[in-house]
Amino acid sequence: MAINLDKPNRWKSDIVQSVDMYNKWFMEFAPVAFRATRIQTTADVETALKLTANLTNIRPVILREYPEILPTLRMSTCPPLAVDRLIGLAGVPNSMVKRMEEEKKLPVRMDDLAVEEELAKIGAIIVKMADPDIFVWLGRKTAPTTTEVHRAATIVADRLCGAVANPIIRNAQEKRQLAAIKTWLEARGYKLPPGDGTRFDAMPAGTFSFRMNVPVKLEDGVKAVNIPVDAVIMPKGAKSKQLPLFFEAKSAGDFTNTNKRRKEEAVKMAQLRTTYGKKVRFNLFLCGYFDSGYLGYEAAEGIDWVWEHRIDDLSLFGI
């Protein structure tokens, strides 16, 4: 039974209420989430400055031992360097820099001498482009004061957080959404599955789990991969071998971004149906800026949804 996808007469009202709910949360809690991340990032930057003798020692040996400081170094230049810009300027392998950025590690198939040479190129670019207005001690004989180092670390941390502001907010919102689902379910007697490692299709009735991997087949019908699903719920009245309900928690702070991302859910739905049949129930838990264009697209794919401001609609799914 369709819950919201077949009721376009209610969409406009729900969109307004959802936007209001998101904006209220953003004004009250987003600054807190951003501030907490900035405090931790400032501490990380201060650690990076200490490791590099306040940006005066960026030798390969330092980068080899602490590859995780590379994002801090990129944000320490004038202007700050995007990953691809650093790769182009330094003339270093794309794979090497991406691995340092994403996995905080160095390539395993590159010999030591080559690694040394490439790290030296990176260090040379950082030294040449280090921002003298932030690191005011560069070029002078006296060491930086504690206040100067902290001020510089705060500026670089702001740059780092600014570059990932949307993910910070999105992650905080997702945690809040999943917490809301958890509270709603537990109030109705639902529990987490006993023990770790329970497969999605072996969950006892009346249980739920978050961020569960579900194996699906790709288009060739042979190769399988795991896709993460935010919330997996096995209804209390589930019959033997019944598939659980799948929910993806989605939030957005503007209408443009949602329309760019709307195909993501359709792809997951297609993969789940290809693997487990048409009885798969994959739905969305929405809060924020989702307009009629987005809703219409998902409805056409057979994807239903629950608005967070009407969370009790979860009961209409037989939960």
Image: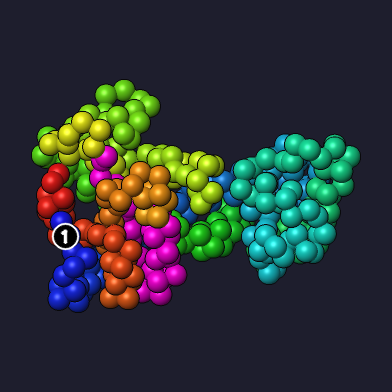
Does 93 sit above or below residue 115?
below
Q: Position of residue 71 (x, y in %)?
A: 64, 53
Q: Give the residue furthest to the top.
A: 195
Label 1 sits on a secondary structure element that is: loop
The range drawn in magenta is 243-268
Assess whether residue 258 is covered by the magenta stretch: yes
Assess whether residue 229 is covered by the magenta stretch: no
Which residue does the image show at 47% across and 44% down from the upper left? 217
Label 1 crowding class (10 Å Cα cut-off): few <14, some 14-19, many 20+? few
Q: Position of residue 83 (x, y in %)?
A: 67, 60
Quadrant (top left/top right/bottom left/bottom right) for the C terminus: top left
In this rendering, would 178 be left or right of 158?
A: left
Q: Nearer the viewer, residue 125 or 176?
A: 176
Q: Nearer the viewer, residue 266 or 249?
A: 266
Q: Position of residue 154 (x, y in %)?
A: 54, 57
Does 284 sit above or below residue 319?
below
In this rendering, would 58 be left or right of 236?
A: right
Residue 127 in view, yes or no: no
Q: Amino acid at mark 1?
A: Ile
| Residue identifier under label 1 | 3
Does 309 sit above or below residue 223?
below
Residue 231 occupies quadrant? top left
Q: Position of residue 88 (x, y in %)?
A: 78, 64
Which residue does the image show at 46% across and 61% down from the upper left? 165
Which residue does the image show at 25% across and 45% down from the upper left? 245
Quadrant (top left/top right/bottom left/bottom right) for the N terminus: bottom left
